[in-house]
Every structure is written in structure tokens, then in C-alpha cells.
Image (cartoon, rainbow, N blue to C red):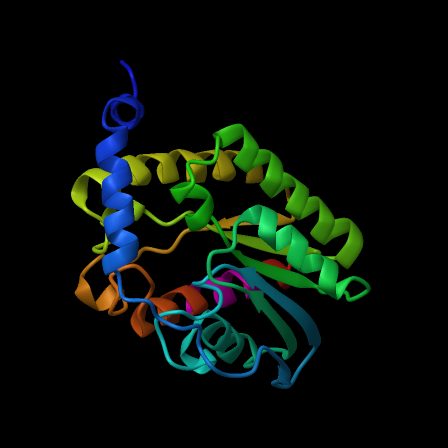
């Protein structure tokens, strides 16, 4: 059986393009969260953390980093470690962009990295093989140039549930995002230092920010807690 979303992308391209333009025009534009993007917190063994991502990594959807992914993750980790963290994230960032961000911090070293990328690769319909190659390159750079020993790669979100997207566009992009995430998960199964982080989010109104596209404070709390627990588990092995 053909992948019907791929057929729809060809046949319904003009409609999908119009819907994409409408989404960009109508969706509420939210700022990145205020607050520190580096610092040290907690007591215990020293641990250096890099959070690398797109708008969700940057905390779009909440006012302050304390309520965003970085703040929620650090809050949990700091109960067990002295965490020195760096957050590098920007709205609209793709995997390719993230590799460019790392150029600006060459010479630094980290023990663990939490990656929040994929949405912008998905909405650009990045080819699966290209996505896999770019993600693999990113992981290699983190290992070889920054000494990262443990990586968490957040699952590509199920875009079909994003309220800001019209149903047809959400279905097509969501199907592509699902294939991207399945490919990422398969690749990570062969790498002992890289782990797939999938969060069980109930996609109700409280899960999303006011724009219907970014995480709410509730979702960031779930995400940060899940990331911290997995990092604690992996780092203690």
C-alpha cells in the first residue's frame, strides 16, 4: 500500500501551501523565554550539561526559563548533582543550524547533552535519509569535539496533534514527523551513548501554549522531569 500522505503531498500541494501560509499569518508569535542560559546549581558530583535545540529548547510558550525545558531539567538534576549548564537554542532552528551553533562554543566540554530538534526539519519535509545523516553528524560532533558521554535525543513531536495546524496539513506533516522519529529511534538503538526520549503527553488544551504550537508549562515540566530521570539513570551506570 502507498503512503497516502506522500500521495497527498503531490496532489494537494497547492492547498497545503496555502494552508502553510495561513498558519504563519494567523498563529500567535510567542517570544523565547527570558532568563539565564548558563549557570551552576546544586550539590553533589559535578556534571556539565548542554541543552541544544529549537524554539522548544528556547522555552517558547512560557515566560521564563525556570518554567521551560532547561529550568525543569536542571531543577531535577540539581537534586543529585552540581550542574553546570549551557543552553543553546533558537526559534526556527533545524539540525543543520544546531551544528552551526556549536561552532560558537568550540573548546568547551560537556558530560551530557539534551537535544530538542526535529519540528523544523519536519515542516520543511527534510528527506528521511538527509535527516538521519545530519542527526548522525551532530552526534559525532558532540562526541568528538565536546567529549559528550551521554546524549538524549527528544522524539520528533507528533505534529498531527498540534492545534495550530489545519487537519489536512497536520496529517501530512505529522505522518512525515512520525517517519523521521521512527528512523531516529532505529539509528539510536545501535549507539550505546545516545538515547531516544519519548514523552507521553496527553494532547489536550493544557498541553499546548496559547499559540497551539509550542509546549505549555505543564508539558515542559513533564519533559524536563523525564529527561532528568533518564539522564540520572544513564549517568549512574
Quadrant, the C terminus: bottom right
Q: Is residue 112 above or below residue 97?
A: below
Where is residue 216? Give x, y as percent: 30, 69
Camera-side residue of 101 and 70: 101
Q: Is 117 contained in the magenta span?
A: no
The residue sitting at the top extreme is: 1
Where is residue 89? Give x, y as percent: 54, 64
Residue 202 appears anywhere in the view: no
The residue sitting at the right extreme is: 107
36 sits left or right of 211 in the view: right
**Secondary structure, magenta segment, majority class:** helix
87 sits left or right of 5 in the view: right
Residue 221's quadrant in the figure?
A: bottom left
Where is residue 199? Give x, y as percent: 37, 56
Q: Is 227 contained in the magenta span?
A: yes
Residue 36 appears anywhere in the view: yes
Quadrant, the N terminus: top left
Q: Is residue 30 above or below residue 23?
A: below
Residue 204's quadrant in the figure?
A: bottom left
41 sits left or right of 230 in the view: right
- How many numbered badges does the structure rendering display? 0
Magenta span = 225-232
Camera-side residue of 57 and 27: 27
Where is residue 65? Give x, y as percent: 46, 79
- Residue at 28 percent across and 21 percent down: it is 7
- Residue at 48 percent across and 77 percent down: it is 71
Amino acid at each position: 500500500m502507498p503512503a497516502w500522505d506522500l500521495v497527498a503531498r503531490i496532489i494537494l500541494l497547492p492547498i497545503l501551501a496555502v494552508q502553510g501560509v495561513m498558519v504563519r499569518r494567523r498563529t500567535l508569535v510567542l517570544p523565547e523565554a527570558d532568563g539565564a542560559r548558563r549557570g551552576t546549581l546544586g550539590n553533589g558530583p559535578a556534571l556539565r550539561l548542554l541543552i541544544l535545540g529549537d524554539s522548544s529548547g528556547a522555552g517558547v510558550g512560557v515566560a521564563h526559563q525556570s518554567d521551560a525545558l532547561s529550568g525543569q531539567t536542571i531543577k531535577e538534576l540539581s537534586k543529585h548533582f552540581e550542574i553546570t549548564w549551557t543552553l543553546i537554542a533558537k526559534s526556527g532552528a533545524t539540525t543543520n543550524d544546531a551544528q552551526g551553533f556549536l561552532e560558537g562554543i568550540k573548546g568547551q566540554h560537556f558530560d551530557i547533552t539534551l537535544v530538542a530538534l526535529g519540528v523544523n526539519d519536519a515542516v520543511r519535509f527534510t528527506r528521511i535519509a538527509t535527516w538521519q545523516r545530519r542527526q548522525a553528524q551532530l552526534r559525532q560532533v558532540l562526541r568528538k569535539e565536546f567529549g559528550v558521554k551521554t546524549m538524549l535525543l527528544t522524539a520528533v513531536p507528533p505534529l498531527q496533534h498540534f492545534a495550530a495546524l489545519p487537519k489536512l496539513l497536520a496529517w501530512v506533516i505529522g505522518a512525515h514527523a512520525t517517519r523521521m522519529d521512527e528512523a531516529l529511534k532505529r539509528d539510536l538503538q545501535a549507539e550505546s551513548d545516545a538515547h531516544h526520549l519519548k514523552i507521553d503527553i496527553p494532547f489536550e488544551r493544557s498541553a499546548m501554549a496559547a499559540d497551539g504550537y509550542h509546549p505549555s508549562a505543564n508539558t515542559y515540566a513533564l519533559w524536563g522531569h523525564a529527561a532528568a530521570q533518564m539522564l540520572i539513570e544513564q549517568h549512574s551506570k
